[in-house]
Amino acid sequence: MARRKHTPDQILAKLRDADVMLAEGLPPAVIAKKLELSEQTYHRWRNQYGGVKGPR
């Protein structure tokens, strides 16, 4: 499978979507699958970008 390079704006958008899903009570593994990410990538992005507030 070819790798995709996500821009910081795309990453922040996916993390915002993940926040909504977390509030609904979904586990991180299901969220990563819905966002078409590996669970490792989801956690890495959360650690790198979790505290960053991007444009809305």
Image (spheres, rainbow, N blue to C red):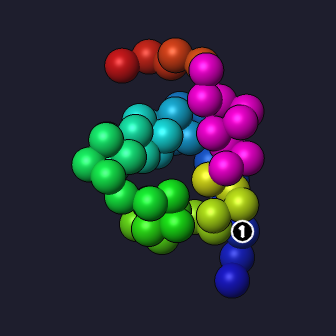
Q: What amino acid is labelled 1 in the image? A: Arg
Which residues fall within the magenta stretch? 43-51
Q: Residue 51, located in which quarter of the rendered image?
A: top right
- The residue shown at (69%, 56%) is 41
Q: Is residue 10 above or below residue 33?
A: above
46 over 42 or under it: above or below: above
Along the line of sight, which residue is nearer the eye, 30 or 4? 30
- Give the prevailing secondary structure in the magenta stretch: helix
Residue 48 in percent (x, y) is at: 73, 33
Q: Position of residue 12 (x, y in %)?
A: 52, 34
Q: Residue at x 26, y 48 (%)?
A: 24
From the image, which quarter does the N terminus lie in? bottom right
Residue under label 1, please give it.
3
Vertical comparison of 1 with 43: above or below? below
Q: Is residue 48 left or right of residue 18?
A: right
Please say whether residue 31 is one of the residues in the magenta stretch. no
Spot the residue most to the left. 24
